[in-house]
Image (tube, grey):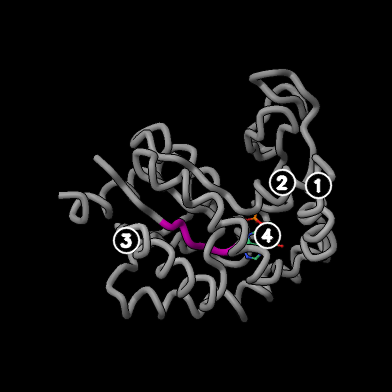
Amino acid sequence: MVIRLVLFGAPGAGKGTQAALLKEHFGALHISTGDLFRRAMKEKSTLGDQVRSYMDLGFLVPDEIVMNLVRKELVDVVKENGFLFDGFPRTIPQAENFEQALSEMHHSLTAVVSLEVEQDLLVRRISGRRVCPKCSALYHVDSLSHGEVCPTDQSPLEQRKDDAEEAVKTRLKTFALQTLPLKEYYREKKLLLQIDGSGTPAAVFARLLSVLQPVLD
Ligand code: AMP
């Protein structure tokens, strides 16, 4: 089954966690623009230098930089067995540009899934979020029973710089102002599917699969 999805939601809504589960289930490629930017910063590339100040403070990277990256990635992405975009698009111009790029490649989206989570829960999830610097796996401190080390490769876990309190406030505001209007945009295009993103990753995944069923038939 080929699936071409956008995972939509506020920071902490669980997009990365659900993308990893969907990837395992459908064998589709997972593309997180945030991960691509973090990798560029780690490698100290020109792209990394361009995006660092925006990311650390919780602002969006300018559309032009995002689209240059995505358009380059898309050439290989569309050859894969489906894709899952996580954290992209984040603005209306990005969505319009994305649609155009896909149609140039004779592709279109299967659906846009919005993970709906209350603000209090978002903040709790983000403040407890830890990431493995080696394998990029995500954890929450409450689910770690042997201290803050990666259960897979024993690397000490880290907190993302933009998960600090001030940057989180900016990211949530940025989401409300610049990204939320995309919901209406995709609703009008009849691509929007909404699910409750609270509860365990497995519970959310079950909801996700059931809402996707009709569009996959
Ligand atoms: P994420 O890992 O998706 O939470 O993204 C982390 C940060 O990367 C965001 O707060 C933005 O600064 C930047 N970023 C990631 N994706 C995009 C995008 N599609 N448009 C603009 N900025 C982005």
Residue 137, how many percent across, how many down? 63, 33
* Residues at discs 3 and 2 in contact (Cβ within 8 Å): no
Q: Which residues are magenta?
A: 6-10
Q: Is the C-beta of the residue carrying label 4 under 8 Å from the nearest atom of ligand 1? A: no
Q: Earlier in the sequence, mark 3 or mark 1?
A: 1
Q: Secondary structure at mark 2?
A: loop
Residue 141 occupies quadrant: top right
Front residue of this view, candidates 75 and 211: 75
Q: Secondary structure at mark 1?
A: loop
Q: What secondary structure is the stretch in magenta mostly built from? A: strand
Residue 94, how many percent across, how many down? 53, 71
- Kind of residue at disc 1: Ser
Q: CA distance from mark 3 to mark 2?
A: 36 Å
Q: Secondary structure at mark 3?
A: loop
* Residue 108 marker: 3
Q: Earlier in the sequence, mark 4 or mark 3?
A: 3
The residue sitting at 75% across, 46% down in the picture is 40
The residue sitting at 84% across, 45% down in the picture is 44
